[in-house]
Image (tube, rainbow, N blue to C red):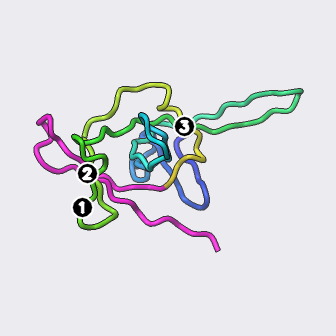
Amino acid sequence: MKTVTLMDQNYCSVEARSRRGAYAQVLLHADDRDEAIAWPCEIWFFFRHVQVVNGDPTEHVFAYVRWYNIHGDNDGRRFVDPFLETWCSSFRVEAMDCIVPVHRLYGQVAVVKYGAQRSVNARTVVISLPKKLLA
């Protein structure tokens, strides 16, 4: 699956024709945190899993994502504007937590790279985009 629509919001994957909508925040319990934070990621693809229990099929939809690394010890430090965060331009090592149910998608983000991207300190600014609200 290349796209998924949740609550009237279209999420795309890297496999879609346009990468617009392929960056999102996912509510994630990462490391040893007590509460979930909205962690930025790049959505690679969506897939379905059908499980049959007592003859009844149940379908679940998942996203395979790549997580951005935290930049230094800033823990997603915010700029003057509360909707801008700085993260590493690199991704975390792929692991089991790269598979997330789509209901954990929190919202779309825009990703802007700045600074020397070839250095170890390459940074990415993550900008939260407004969500569509259903009336």
Q: Secondary structure at mark 3?
A: strand
In the image, the segment drawn in magenta is 107-135
Q: Residue drawn at (47%, 32%), measured in percent from left and top?
A: 98
Q: Are marks 3 and 1 in contact (CB under 8 Å)?
A: no
- Magenta-colored stretch includes residue 83: no
Q: Secondary structure at mark 1?
A: loop
Residue at which label 2 appears: 86
Which residue is rendered at x = 64% and y = 34% of the image?
48
Q: Nearer the viewer, residue 60 or 106?
A: 106
Q: Mark 1 belongs to which amino acid?
A: Phe
Q: Quadrant of the N terminus?
A: top right
Tell me what residue is drawn at x 31 percent, y 38 percent: 69
**Quadrant of residue 53 within the rendered picture:** top right
Residue 63, placed above or below residue 125: above
Q: Position of residue 106 (x, y in %)?
A: 51, 53
Q: Which residue is mark 3?
A: 100
Residue 65 point in image, percent of width and height:
45, 36
Residue of label 1 = 79
Please tell me how many numbered marks the rendered image carries. Answer: 3
**Separation of residues labelled 3 and 2 (CA atoms):** 23 Å
Badge 2 element: strand
Q: Residue at x 42, y 40 (%)?
A: 14
Closer to us: 5 or 109: 109
Amino acid at dot 3: Val
* Relative horizontal placement of residue 45, taking residue 91 as reference (left or right): right
Residue 115 percent location from the top left of the image: 12, 48
- Which of the two discs, 3 and 2, labels the residue nearer the N terminus? 2
Q: Nearer the viewer, mark 3 or mark 2?
A: 2
The reply to whether the C-beta atoms of the residues labelled 2 and 1 are less than 8 Å apart is yes
